[in-house]
Image (tube, rainbow, N blue to C red):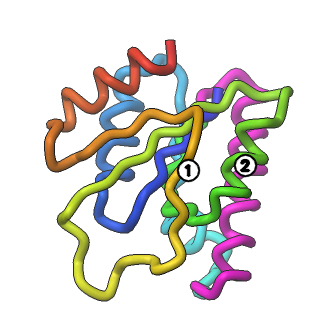
């Protein structure tokens, strides 16, 4: 299984990824910032983001093929890329859209495209980490 935690910066993606990993028996986290550091990708342009996302998707597929639940914690602003992964019939992909009003000024991605279908919506201002994890676990079962 591949779990996509997507949303603007500071919406709780990494926090929920680590909390979720504690509840799953075999899971690995692919965090966008860590992938960037490993690949030395400091390019935040549209092309740079797309490279980082597609590379993260490849890593997630490798984990999933080895029976490890991949938890992707990425801003991942491109709906089309997320939909391509969700529509790949070889993988069980669940998209979780996180949003919050806690965005730091200047950190928002202007061209972020929220999901339109087949996703779980979580307002991390409303739900605690524990409540959010419970909602996610219910959704992926």
The alpha-carbon separation of the residues under discs 2 and 1 comes to 8 Å
Residue 41 against residue 29 in the figure, above or below: below
Range covered by the magenta-colored residues: 44-69
* Viewer-nearest residue: 23 or 111: 111
Q: Secondary structure at mark 2?
A: helix
Measured as percent of width and height from the top left, residue 124 is found at 23, 46
Q: Quadrant of residue 109?
A: bottom left
Residue 36 against residue 116 in the figure, above or below: below
What is the count of numbered marks?
2
Measured as percent of width and height from the top left, residue 123 is found at 26, 45
Q: Is residue 48 magenta?
A: yes
The N terminus is located in which quarter? top right
Question: Residue shown at 52%/35% (left/top)?
Answer: 119
Q: Which mark is residue 30?
A: 1
Question: Residue shown at 69%/43% (left/top)?
Answer: 60
Mark 2 or 1 closer to N-term? 1
- Check contact, mark 2 vs mark 1: CB within 8 A: yes
Q: Main secondary structure of the magenta part?
A: helix
Q: Residues within 10 Å of mark 2 (few under 14, many from 20)?
A: some
Residue 29 against residue 49 in the figure, above or below: above
Measured as percent of width and height from the top left, residue 86 is found at 71, 38
User: In this figure, which residue is indicated by the disc labeled 2?
Assistant: 59
Q: Secondary structure at mark 1?
A: strand
In the image, is 125 to the left or to the right of 34?
left
Q: Quadrant of residue 133?
A: top left
Question: Residue shown at 14%/42% (left/top)?
Answer: 126
Q: Residues within 10 Å of mark 1 (few under 14, many from 20)?
A: many
């Amino acid at each position: 299984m591949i779990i996509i935690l997507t949303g603007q910066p500071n919406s709780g993606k990494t926090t929920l990824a680590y909390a979720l990993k504690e509840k799953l028996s075999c899971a690995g986290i692919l965090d966008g910032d860590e992938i960037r550091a490993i690949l030395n990708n400091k390019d935040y342009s549209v092309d740079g983001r797309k490279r980082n996302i597609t590379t993260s998707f490849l890593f997630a597929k490798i984990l999933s093929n080895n029976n490890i639940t991949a938890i992707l914690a990425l801003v991942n602003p491109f709906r089309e890329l997320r939909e391509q992964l969700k529509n790949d019939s070889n993988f069980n992909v669940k998209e979780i859209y996180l949003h919050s009003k806690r965005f730091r000024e200047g950190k928002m991605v202007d061209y972020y495209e929220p999901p339109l279908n087949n996703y779980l919506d979580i307002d991390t201002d409303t739900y605690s980490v524990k409540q959010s994890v419970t909602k996610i676990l219910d959704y992926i079962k």
